[in-house]
Amino acid sequence: MTTTIYGIKNCDTMKKAFGWLDKAGVAYDFHDYKKDGVSKGALEKWCKAAGWETVLNRAGTTFRKLADADKEGLNERRAIALMLAQPSMIKRPVLETGTKVIVGFKPEIYEKQFGAAKTRK
């Protein structure tokens, strides 16, 4: 099973996720979507798995700075277009573990996915 973590390298939440994965001995590939972009297909997959409302980071500065007209009447199609245009609007991290997509970092969810025993090194 290949695990890929998507996000922005210097994000504090990403650093916590990297630290957790490293401590747990989980091998992963990192995709910096600020630097390398993200495909529409990936965003559609994440939105289908977790819901576009979860994938869109409404709490971030980039979203809050949007014009009110851009925030009104959001739906999945419009949210994906916004995230494609400005990847900073994607919640971090997004973790793909083969068949599962996990959005955001919560240690208890990572433990459930990868096994709590690994984190006790």
Image: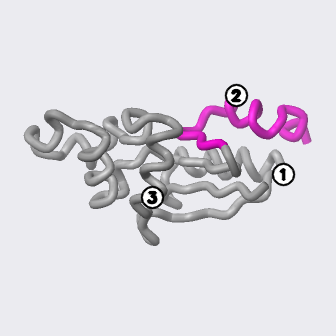
Looking at the image, tell me whether mark 2 or mark 3 is earlier in sequence order: 3
As shown in the figure, which amino acid type bears the numbered disc 2? Glu
Residue labelled with disc 1:
25
Residue labelled with disc 2:
108
User: Quick check: 44 above or below 28?
Assistant: above
Residue at figure coordinates x 88%, y 40% from the top left: 118
Residue labelled with disc 3:
41
User: Quick check: 64 above or below 30?
Assistant: above
**Region in magenta:** 100-121
As shown in the figure, which amino acid type bears the numbered disc 1? Gly
As shown in the figure, which amino acid type bears the numbered disc 3? Gly
Image coordinates for residue 25, horizontal then vertical, percent: 84, 51
In the image, which is nearer the foreground, mark 3 or mark 1? 3
Looking at the image, tell me whether mark 3 or mark 1 is earlier in sequence order: 1
- Magenta stretch: includes residue 118: yes
Element class at badge 1: loop
The foreground one among 50 and 110 is 50
